[in-house]
């Protein structure tokens, strides 16, 4: 029996957009692919994306060296992870998840979204999962815990859809300070029969 080839390899080209899912963070994050899949359901879909998504990881460093430049050491002093996307579909419920100071009421068939004001503070964080699907080379999932730190700009133009462009800034997920988990389908390899 031949080995089952791994899916995502270092020479695969990752092409295409994906879907973003959001659930309230309650000190639990998905730690397995099965758990991630249980989060990626229609009820948790934040909205449909236009223009793809961007994951940025950056770090600030300082360099220590002796006066003659013989010995050097680079130390990471700070790090940031941000997941950005453009949402082409949204409503007041979406905005409530994107804006910390936001409250919604519904009455008589009308949704009222109140934005701003300390009395509307929610103070919560979300588990944010971006799922990139690739039937040939394997799916991947980006998992962060955070909240939108970009506010919201709504541009109503006559010739294009109104995009909401959140930027979810990650907070540490565990005692190691992990900001991002990246899950990839790599398939399973099995030993050939009749030998090792």
Image (cartoon, rainbow, N blue to C red):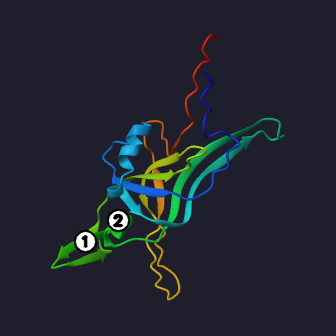
Please identify, in this view, whether the residue under mark 1 or under mark 2 is nearer the observer: 1
Residue occupied by mark 2? 100
Is 162 rendered above or below residue 130?
below
Judged from the image, the secondary structure of the residue bearing numbered disc 1 is strand
Q: Identify the residue at image location x=34%, y=50%.
A: 25
Q: Quadrant of the C terminus?
A: top right
Q: Quadrant of the N terminus?
A: top right
Residue occupied by mark 1? 104
Q: Identify the residue at image location x=29%, y=62%.
A: 122
State the count of labels: 2
Which mark is on residue 182?
none
Q: Identify the residue at image location x=56%, y=63%.
A: 52
Judged from the image, the secondary structure of the residue bearing numbered disc 2 is loop
- Of residue 118 and residue 180, the one placed in the foreground of this image is 180
Q: Which residue is farthest bottom?
A: 158
Q: Identify the residue at image location x=44%, y=79%.
A: 154
Q: Position of residue 133 (x, y in %)?
A: 52, 51
Residue 83 appears in the rendering: yes
Is 99 rendered above or below residue 131?
below
Q: Residues within 10 Å of mark 2 (few under 14, many from 20)?
A: many
Q: Position of residue 189 (x, y in %)?
A: 58, 26
Report which quarter residue 90 is drawn in.
Answer: bottom left
Q: Position of residue 139 (x, y in %)?
A: 53, 46
Is 2 rendered above or below residue 93?
above
Distance from the alpha carbon under mark 1 to that under mark 2: 12 Å
Q: Residues within 10 Å of mark 1 (few under 14, many from 20)?
A: some
Q: Position of residue 193 (x, y in %)?
A: 60, 14
Task: Check if mark 1's residue and mark 2's residue have beta carbons within 8 Å.
Answer: no
- Of residue 179 and residue 127, the one placed in the foreground of this image is 127
Residue 125 appears in the rendering: no
């Amino acid at each position: 029996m031949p080995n089952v080839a791994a899916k995502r390899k270092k020479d695969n080209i990752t092409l295409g957009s994906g879907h973003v899912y959001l659930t309230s963070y309650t000190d639990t994050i998905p730690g397995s692919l099965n758990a991630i899949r249980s989060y990626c359901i229609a009820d948790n879909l934040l909205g449909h994306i236009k223009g793809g998504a961007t994951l940025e990881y950056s770090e600030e460093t300082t360099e220590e060296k002796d006066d003659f430049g013989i010995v050097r050491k680079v130390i990471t002093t700070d790090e940031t992870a941000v997941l950005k996307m453009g949402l082409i579909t949204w409503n007041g419920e979406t905005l409530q998840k994107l804006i910390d100071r936001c409250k919604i009421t519904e009455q008589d068939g009308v949704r009222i979204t109140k934005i701003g004001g300390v009395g509307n503070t929610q103070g919560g964080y979300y588990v944010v999962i971006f799922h990139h699907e690739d039937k040939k080379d394997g799916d991947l999932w980006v998992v962060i815990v955070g909240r939108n730190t970009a506010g919201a700009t709504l541009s109503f133009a006559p010739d294009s859809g109104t995009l909401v462009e959140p930027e979810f800034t990650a907070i540490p997920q565990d005692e190691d300070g992990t900001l991002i988990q990246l899950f990839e389908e790599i398939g399973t390899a099995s030993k050939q029969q009749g030998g090792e």
